[in-house]
Image: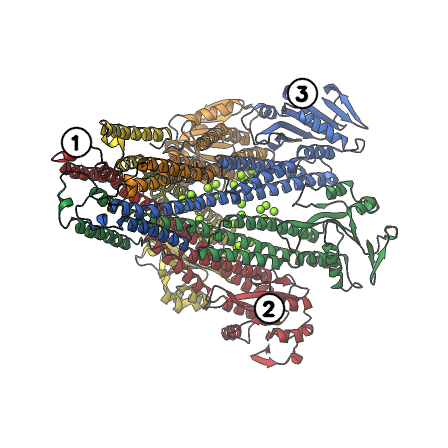
Chain colours: A orange, B blue, C yellow, D green, E red
Amino acid sequence: MFFQILEDLSPISLDEYNTNILTLGIITIEELENCYTTFGFSELTVSECKNNTRQIHGAIEIYEDYHFSILTGMERKHIIRLMDRIAIFIKENLFLIVTIEDTNNSIQNDLFESLKHQNLSKTSLERLIYSFLERFIYDNYKILEKIEIEISSHEDKINDNRLSRDFNHEITRIQKKLLLLDNYYEQLAVLGEELEENAIDIFKEENLRYFKLFTERVTRLSTHTRMLKDYLVHVKDSYHAQLDYNLNNIMKMFTVVTTIFLPLTLIVGWYGMNFSYMPELSWKYGYLFVIILSILVAIICILYFKKKKFL
Amino acid sequence: MFFQILEDLSPISLDEYNTNILTLGIITIEELENCYTTFGFSELTVSECKNNTRQIHGAIEIYEDYHFSILTGMERKHIIRLMDRIAIFIKENLFLIVTIEDTNNSIQNDLFESLKHQNLSKTSLERLIYSFLERFIYDNYKILEKIEIEISSHEDKINDNRLSRDFNHEITRIQKKLLLLDNYYEQLAVLGEELEENAIDIFKEENLRYFKLFTERVTRLSTHTRMLKDYLVHVKDSYHAQLDYNLNNIMKMFTVVTTIFLPLTLIVGWYGMNFSYMPELSWKYGYLFVIILSILVAIICILYFKKKKFL
Amino acid sequence: MFFQILEDLSPISLDEYNTNILTLGIITIEELENCYTTFGFSELTVSECKNNTRQIHGAIEIYEDYHFSILTGMERKHIIRLMDRIAIFIKENLFLIVTIEDTNNSIQNDLFESLKHQNLSKTSLERLIYSFLERFIYDNYKILEKIEIEISSHEDKINDNRLSRDFNHEITRIQKKLLLLDNYYEQLAVLGEELEENAIDIFKEENLRYFKLFTERVTRLSTHTRMLKDYLVHVKDSYHAQLDYNLNNIMKMFTVVTTIFLPLTLIVGWYGMNFSYMPELSWKYGYLFVIILSILVAIICILYFKKKKFL
Amino acid sequence: MFFQILEDLSPISLDEYNTNILTLGIITIEELENCYTTFGFSELTVSECKNNTRQIHGAIEIYEDYHFSILTGMERKHIIRLMDRIAIFIKENLFLIVTIEDTNNSIQNDLFESLKHQNLSKTSLERLIYSFLERFIYDNYKILEKIEIEISSHEDKINDNRLSRDFNHEITRIQKKLLLLDNYYEQLAVLGEELEENAIDIFKEENLRYFKLFTERVTRLSTHTRMLKDYLVHVKDSYHAQLDYNLNNIMKMFTVVTTIFLPLTLIVGWYGMNFSYMPELSWKYGYLFVIILSILVAIICILYFKKKKFL
Amino acid sequence: MFFQILEDLSPISLDEYNTNILTLGIITIEELENCYTTFGFSELTVSECKNNTRQIHGAIEIYEDYHFSILTGMERKHIIRLMDRIAIFIKENLFLIVTIEDTNNSIQNDLFESLKHQNLSKTSLERLIYSFLERFIYDNYKILEKIEIEISSHEDKINDNRLSRDFNHEITRIQKKLLLLDNYYEQLAVLGEELEENAIDIFKEENLRYFKLFTERVTRLSTHTRMLKDYLVHVKDSYHAQLDYNLNNIMKMFTVVTTIFLPLTLIVGWYGMNFSYMPELSWKYGYLFVIILSILVAIICILYFKKKKFL
Ligand SMILES: [Mg+2]
Ligand SMILES: [Mg+2]
Ligand SMILES: [Mg+2]
Ligand SMILES: [Mg+2]
Ligand SMILES: [Mg+2]
Ligand SMILES: [Mg+2]
Ligand SMILES: [Mg+2]
Ligand SMILES: [Mg+2]
Ligand SMILES: [Mg+2]
Ligand SMILES: [Mg+2]
Ligand SMILES: [Mg+2]
Ligand SMILES: [Mg+2]
Ligand SMILES: [Mg+2]
Ligand SMILES: [Mg+2]
Ligand SMILES: [Mg+2]
Ligand SMILES: [Mg+2]
Ligand SMILES: [Mg+2]
Ligand SMILES: [Mg+2]
Ligand SMILES: [Mg+2]
Ligand SMILES: [Mg+2]
Ligand SMILES: [Mg+2]
Ligand SMILES: [Mg+2]
Ligand SMILES: [Mg+2]
Ligand SMILES: [Mg+2]
Ligand SMILES: [Mg+2]
Ligand SMILES: [Mg+2]
Ligand SMILES: [Mg+2]
Ligand SMILES: [Mg+2]
Ligand SMILES: [Mg+2]
Ligand SMILES: [Mg+2]
């Protein structure tokens, strides 16, 4: 779909495309293949859109009279995999979005939502792009907050010594997610800075501040992501230390148990010997003596470990 | 509340606002909503003030003729959570503070305290801002010193081997606090540098040094925070090593105890066997022999472990 | 082999070399030794080509009127060792490739493949170089993806607690590979930037963007490599934590087993003592009492460990 | 004390101070409070000198016509705490040192020592400052060398497996010291660079190289400090690995001891059973058989562990 | 020894020194003390040459009309300690080498070797310096390769589980060596960059590329050194993980052994009890029953551990 933006949004066909009127497009790869020559886009950009190998890293490239970029957005519900893959072409008076992957149609919704928040009779190419990109990262703060809560709940589990079998797995999963996010924001920041630079001179100087605003917001998301990375490292360290602390406690307890029983076992073994001459065995108070001795040994061991802070 | 600053501080109503006279304001979000159009502030800034999602990271943005920033200060008593959230607007001849969150009225106190330390008849916009921000971070050195003492007391605990159950938890809590502080000072430094840059040219060149002074102070706080982070990492490493050292000692002790009792238990088991022909059992000195053998075995074990530095 | 590029590729002998016509060469070291004086290359560059010591790090050097560089490519199949060593000389109207090591002739294939993708009648020195270098790193994304899958499969193994004897070895092998790749891309990026700088002024300004495009692609590969490095560190940490977690479990199980059997062994040892006066031994229900006592002790131990989360 | 430097050092009173003659001062805080207005210093600087909170981080500030800095030096003997706190004021033709803390009068000695090494008739403000600062860090290399020897001796202790109880404590103490030193040199480097910048234009261009020389020396000290930090991290890692290595050896030994005694104890327990029908018990060679069996079991265990490299 | 370089190398005495003719000198500290005033060198430089405290870090300083630097080279055979300490003075038309420490005369050999590789009639000050410095680092690649092989052999040892007592010690030794090398190359790079900057304008612009070439080579050595540092960290991590893996295996084996013998020992202890009424004891198949029970218990334990992957 292509739209001319004069007073309002008016749908046009490709033939009606006029380089002097601000035009917005949202098309599929198949449509791109049919029309890229009309706009003078390089065949290379089309093949990059079709190439699915470069999963995370999009492209951010400048050609003679247009910007080309491939971005991968985050699906709100499932943030482990990056989804919503789009390519954008920016040329004088043209902002063209190619939806490479978007099963739930969220890109188109984002675009129309962003259009609602601007006065279309006074809008500009820069404002159009800014509003769309802004929408693209709109609720990312909530995503980061969700991750923060997740990490925090893991911290609480460690502090309560509830270390489940999956703990380790969970931590690595979050780290992977933060790694993806960090790279994702870095990529968006590079895009923002490139647009701000206005190397091929298709933007108005006074509107470049929109791109600066976008870069600043992405940078704040990026800083927050790195803080979460650091926080997670601290939680992980705490987990490792907790495992070591627990091991020490297990071994202390084990040592206490063994050290109490070993001498007792020796004593009872001793009086199980079959020597013909063992005076204690026939002594009247022999059995009583062994009972008292055993109790004494046990008490001494316990007192010793209490002193040693093992108990 | 709005004040004109001529010779002294004189309260004015919004209608009396004169763009040619240095004006100071401290208002609530509700008041901001009523007056932002008077000052020509964007609706976006108001909605950012009301949006509570972005907890830590404030905003530092430049608009056409004013600076806008959201800052989160530290409550003196409870430094784990950042509190005292404010927004500031800086325009030619105007310094406007919006208190977003401040249950104990400390922001207003800070502001009036800062006014006391300057000669109002000779003050300037830059001096006003500087004095307020300076107050905002006034006793942060004490906060850092308190953290340093806390870390140091943890270090002492490790050296005395008093490793409590909560140790791990405490360390992570301090690390989180330092992470927050580090980001907090970084944010303030960015604000200071932005004001120093004077991009929209509303400050006098000769007064920019106030902002430089502020940036330098924040940077020193930031450097100190990072030193504390490094110190804490060292203390944490020491904790981990102490756990390992203790485990070695526990296992050494355990090995000693077991190695002494195992041969003794074998000996007494040996003479508990019921073979019809076991000459030692009927030997006159059999029992004495076992007593001496047991003592010998115990002594040899102990000497061996002494030599091996296990005891 | 030398080729003049006018309308098409025409093979020439060294004598026909004309500095005014775009020339492409692909030769061996032996051929280089015979012809380097013709092109005015320094003897030093020849000896560097012959010197096999500097395995990974090639050379990137600028001489008075030519660029000289030694590159080491990756063989598609076996990516542990870098292979395909080449030297390139770039002079006005000349692009000369020296194949130092290339057993499977892949360099020459790459070169001719790259020529197919350009219109030779409109090509330029810059385009020639770009197309060749682009080919040189063409399928590197697949290599990185293969490594990512490998790391990911190791992560799965940890999560399923299938820790084989070779795990450790595998991790170090991948780390080494990523270390090589990181340096390799850094080197290519340096080359790209140097060509873009055009210090000796042999390229046309308008064609420098080819080198920028190359640098950007290499940088994306480099960023991806570093992400994989971080990912692998996370997986390694997870492996270490898993080992510690397993050790805790082993020791818990061990403690449980020992703590159940030690008191039982004491009890049976107790009634194996040979005192003449032990009333329980001749008590009618003595044996029954020991049976019940043993079962009780075992149950209490098991309940205790259940409560302590050891079982 | 104030001195005019013309041909030689001549003590003057404050009243004789002449802004056209090179003047050197070394005074206490009390004296500063009496004279700061004479020199036009801000009241803020005096209060900073009196404020003892900012222990490590001094101040490095530029005012309209003077530099102000607070430095904390190292006492030669006791290098754990930074001591010798001074403030310096640098104005055209004036170098003023305020001794804030200096129990052993070392600052004054340093100053006079530094004066001895320059030709006073040809000296300059820059030379005066340089010579004093140079003295201030004069024997810091010896301090670093002492730390290096200390770390090295700890390394030797690890290699000889002499791991004392205080090891951990010692390491953290040295790390803290290096952290302080690192920050200390960073501070001095910032001062040196600031003086070199000559922002308020009170130094002669041709003499700025003195400050560059100072900065270079401080940077070398700083680089050496960081190398020591890295070295200490290596030694610490080695300590951790040694603890783990020792634990493995303890557990190997323990496993060997237990595995030898457990089957023997089973054997002797076996023939301690009281079954009425146990043919071995009445067998003529029963006892001999058990003796030989026990020896065989012990030998087989030992051979097994030899093969497994446990012994 | 001093030499004038016109057509060839001609030895001269100090009196014949002519500032207009390219002069090369190689002298001892004692000779320097006699002649430094002739060249106008500062007394400070002489005292720095004599001062032996600053072992690793040489000096790199610029004076009014000469460069001064102290360098410490690596002896080919023994690379743990840096040796071959020299000072160099570079002035217009003068390159002066002072050999501070060089027991095997290698510096002088290097110098004459470097002279052989240049056409003395066409040489220049820059070429002279470059050739000498190039010689100074000539075979450093071999040194790095030797270290790489050493690390690699340690990696193999870990993979084969041949962890000797000295492993730890060896790793720290190599890390120390790489730390020294890293600093060493950084120093040389600083020297190269300083010469390239030509701050005191004593070099010809067109010859500055010699210094650039030197800096580039040193940087490549430095990059390689850092790669080796990273590699060694990976190998060290692998060693730590191997220790933990081994400990797990030891404890698994130990748990298996104990868990098999404990129930057996309980059984035989059980039938060693002396109750007057124990029906099994007089049961005809009692002994057979215990034999079968013991075998069953052992088999069940072994099957259980096989299932748990302990065996
Ligand atoms: Mg990133
Ligand atoms: Mg950051
Ligand atoms: Mg950094
Ligand atoms: Mg951070
Ligand atoms: Mg951190
Ligand atoms: Mg651990
Ligand atoms: Mg931050
Ligand atoms: Mg930070
Ligand atoms: Mg810092
Ligand atoms: Mg620091
Ligand atoms: Mg550190
Ligand atoms: Mg450990
Ligand atoms: Mg790298
Ligand atoms: Mg590299
Ligand atoms: Mg990156
Ligand atoms: Mg990254
Ligand atoms: Mg990371
Ligand atoms: Mg571990
Ligand atoms: Mg610092
Ligand atoms: Mg530092
Ligand atoms: Mg350094
Ligand atoms: Mg270093
Ligand atoms: Mg290191
Ligand atoms: Mg260094
Ligand atoms: Mg370094
Ligand atoms: Mg590097
Ligand atoms: Mg770096
Ligand atoms: Mg590297
Ligand atoms: Mg690495
Ligand atoms: Mg370990």
* CB atoms of marks 2 and 1 within 8 Å: no
In the picture, which quadrant includes the C terminus of chain C? Answer: top left
Question: What residue type is disc 2 on?
Answer: Ile
- The kind of residue on which mark 3 rests is Cys
Neighbor class of circle 2 (other Cα within 10 Å; few <14, some 14-19, many 20+) is many
Tell me the amino acid under the disc marked 1.
Answer: Pro
Instruction: Say whether residue E47 is left or right of residue B269.
Output: right
**Whole-percent x, y for residue D78 in the image:** 64, 53
Q: Chain of mark 3?
A: B
Locate the N terminus of chain C by quadrant.
bottom left
Question: Residue at position x 25%, y 54% from top?
Answer: D303
Front tag of 2 and 3: 2
Q: Which mark is residue B35?
A: 3
Say which element carries label 1.
Answer: helix
Q: Residues within 10 Å of mark 1 (few under 14, many from 20)?
A: few
Q: Which residue is at the front of the view, D44 or C210?
A: D44
Question: Please, is residue A75 above or below residue D271 in the view?
Answer: above
Between residue B35 and residue E142, name the one nearer to us.
E142
Q: In this view of the protein, which residue sits in the foreground, D95 or B290? A: B290
Confirm whether residue E304 shows in the render.
Answer: yes
Up-down relation of residue E123 to residue C165 (above or below): below
User: With A219 as the anchor, is B71 left or right in this view?
Assistant: right
Residue E88 tag number: 2
Which badge, 2 or 1, comes first in the chain's sequence? Answer: 2
Which residue matches tag 1? Answer: E279
